[in-house]
């Protein structure tokens, strides 16, 4: 049984050509940063600073108009204005992390640039992200959208991991000494647990390692679909309620320290302390779902009891009298009378979605994809595969990579994710390596903030960005470079492969790396190393 559906009252009027600002009123001579994600767009104007970042759904939805006359199409931030999300169907331009509907993507991005940021693309520069392993046709379509459709003056295309690493190093440099090994080396691993997949990218001296980019084909979308199947099989049919289940996942799911121990807790009466209830929207009284407070103890409050309790056990005590052993007559089994809850007149009848083991078994898939039939490793082993490859055969380089493991992405915001990830990763890493794991303060906006840092370095940006004139003059050779799939093609394509003009790793000898790593290694681990030597 699906929840009732209602009209989408309160939605902002959709944008039209007449509603958009005139070109004369739009800003120019600025640098726009866009993190093109599968679930949301993260964008800002670099000159406005890091506090001006915006986020909007990278999707469109066709909903009923507020006046009831026909349907309207909402895009981007307009979807956030929808009050009743019950039955809201989102149409996304990305499939499995890559843009496949470019016409829809252009409409969403055009509305975000002109209405949300208020900029004129023809008079602006651009920093935009694309996922790793993008196909040649996808790269060509991105270039065409940037230069031919929007007409940006120059553009720099890079991966979210590279921007995240740059911003993380910027934050680390302010907290640590300038001569610190982690600051000087600028090496590490970035684990990006996003909407469509998870990537682990190894860096050496600020440059991506070609064979150090590993992907796990699981992300937030797969977890939402998995949760939809579970609740649809056990309770309500929620297969068409992606927006509702997404909200349920974000508010109720968490990562368990030990999944087997948590399953034992679920065997307690009525789910024990793990059980939670989510109030579903009905389109009338509840327009946005929410977690029911004290749902773990709600059974006692509403008058419901356990299964019928009998007043007498199956066997009676023996009575030894003067005449010998006799047995008492069994008493009649009388069931307890159940209390019936009488709802108040003003209290509406809500529909609840009850979650017990689903709360932690859904995020558990990130650590054990085999739970749903996946033939890939978890996120912890993904990091080790990114570091321990042929391009990082040097022990010193691997030691530097494990010194800075950066976790970002929306899936990393699950409660207890970082603690579980560190506990899973530590046994997979040699005890001779010091392991440092950190999470960005805002895992979703980290890549966008890294683009702001690049835009401030104008000399570096202009050196690596591709101008519109260069693109139009060398379109054929740029396409040939995309077809070759080379990591560093001879032709400039505007793809950022490094963020430092002068490498610093060559200035670090192996002896200093070993000494500094030994200082950071705890004393008990040093004893283990010396004992095994």
Image (spheres, rainbow, N blue to C red):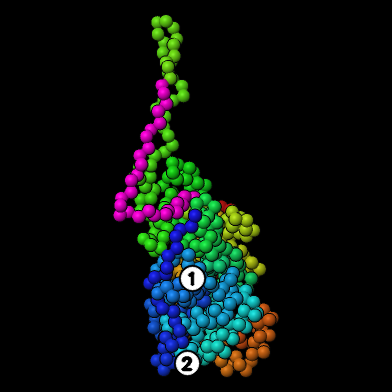
**Considering only order in the chain, which callout, 2 or 1, is on the residue closer to the N terminus?**
2
Return the residue nearer the eye: 68 or 220. Answer: 68
Q: Position of residue 217 (x, y in %)?
A: 60, 64
- Asked if residue 304 lies left or right of residue 41, the reply is left
Q: Position of residue 486 (x, y in %)?
A: 66, 79
Residues shaded magenta: 331-357
Helix, strand or loop under label 2? helix
Residue at 37% in and 37% down = 338
Query: Tag on residue 289?
Result: none
Return the residue nearer the eye: 243 or 223. Answer: 243
Question: Taking 267 as reference, is 162 above or below it?
Answer: below
User: How would you rate the neighbour count of disc 1 (Cα within 10 Å): few for under 14, some for 14-19, many for 20 or more?
Assistant: many
Question: Taking 466 as reference, is 71 above or below it?
Answer: above
Residue at 42% in and 86% down = 19
Q: Quadrant of the C terminus?
A: bottom right
Residue at 58% in and 77% down = 101
Alpha carbons under labels 1 and 2: distance apart: 39 Å
Query: Residue tagged by mark 1?
Result: 182
- SS assignment for the magenta stretch, majority: loop
Residue 200 picture quarter = bottom right
Return the residue nearer the eye: 470 or 36. Answer: 36
- Residue 364 in the magenta stretch? The answer is no
Q: Position of residue 29 (x, y in %)?
A: 44, 91
- Looking at the image, the residue that sits furthest to the front is 69
Query: Residue tagged by mark 2?
Result: 123
User: How would you rate the neighbour count of disc 2 (Cα within 10 Å): few for under 14, some for 14-19, many for 20 or more?
Assistant: some
């Amino acid at each position: 049984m699906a929840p009732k559906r209602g009209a989408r009252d309160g939605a902002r009027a959709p944008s039209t050509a007449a509603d958009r600002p005139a070109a004369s009123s739009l800003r120019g001579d600025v640098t726009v940063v866009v993190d093109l994600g599968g679930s949301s767009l993260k964008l800002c104007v670099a000159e406005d600073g890091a506090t001006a970042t915006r986020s909007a759904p990278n999707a469109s939805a066709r909903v009923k108009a507020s006046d009831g006359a026909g349907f309207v199409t909402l895009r981007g931030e307009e979807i956030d204005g929808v009050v009743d999300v019950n039955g809201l169907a989102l149409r996304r331009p990305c499939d499995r992390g890559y843009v496949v509907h470019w016409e829809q993507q252009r409409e969403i991005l055009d509305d975000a640039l002109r209405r949300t940021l208020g900029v004129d693309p023809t008079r602006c520069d651009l920093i935009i992200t694309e996922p790793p392993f993008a196909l040649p046709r996808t790269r060509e379509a991105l270039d065409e959208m940037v230069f031919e459709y929007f007409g940006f003056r120059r553009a720099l295309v890079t991966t979210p991991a590279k921007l995240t690493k740059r911003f993380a190093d910027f934050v680390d440099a302010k907290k640590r000494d300038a001569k610190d090994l982690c600051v000087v080396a600028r090496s590490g691993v970035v684990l990006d647990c996003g909407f469509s997949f998870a990537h682990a990218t190894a860096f050496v001296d600020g440059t991506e390692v070609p064979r150090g980019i590993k992907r796990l084909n699981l992300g937030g979308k797969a977890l939402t679909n998995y949760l939809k199947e579970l609740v649809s099989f056990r309770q309500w049919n929620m297969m068409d309620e992606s927006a509702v289940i997404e909200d349920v996942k974000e508010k109720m799911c968490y990562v368990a320290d030990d999944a087997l121990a948590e399953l034992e807790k679920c065997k307690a009466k009525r789910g024990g302390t793990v059980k939670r209830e989510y109030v579903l929207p009905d389109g009338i009284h509840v327009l946005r779902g929410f977690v029911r407070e004290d749902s773990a103890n709600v059974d006692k409050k509403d008058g419901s009891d356990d299964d019928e309790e009998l007043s007498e056990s199956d066997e009676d005590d023996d009575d030894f009298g003067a005449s010998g052993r006799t047995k008492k007559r069994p008493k009649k089994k009388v069931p307890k009378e159940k209390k019936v809850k009488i709802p108040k007149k003003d209290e509406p009848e809500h529909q609840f979605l009850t979650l017990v083991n689903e709360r932690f078994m859904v995020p558990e898939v990130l650590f054990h994809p085999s739970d749903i039939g996946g033939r890939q490793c978890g996120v912890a082993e993904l990091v080790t595969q990114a570091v321990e490859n042929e391009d990082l055969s040097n022990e010193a380089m691997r030691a530097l990579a494990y010194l800075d493991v950066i976790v970002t992405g929306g899936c990393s915001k699950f409660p207890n994710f970082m603690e579980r990830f560190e506990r899973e990763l530590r046994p997979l890493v040699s005890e001779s390596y010091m392991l440092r794991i950190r999470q960005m303060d805002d895992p979703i906006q980290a890549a966008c903030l890294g683009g702001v840092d690049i835009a401030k370095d104008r000399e570096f940006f202009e050196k690596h960005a591709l101008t519109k004139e260069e693109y139009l003059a060398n379109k054929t050779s740029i396409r040939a470079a995309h077809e070759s799939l080379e990591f560093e093609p001879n032709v400039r394509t505007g793809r950022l492969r490094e963020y430092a003009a002068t490498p610093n790793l060559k200035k670090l000898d192996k002896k200093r790396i070993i000494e500094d790593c030994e200082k950071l290694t705890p004393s008990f681990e040093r004893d283990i190393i010396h004992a095994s030597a």
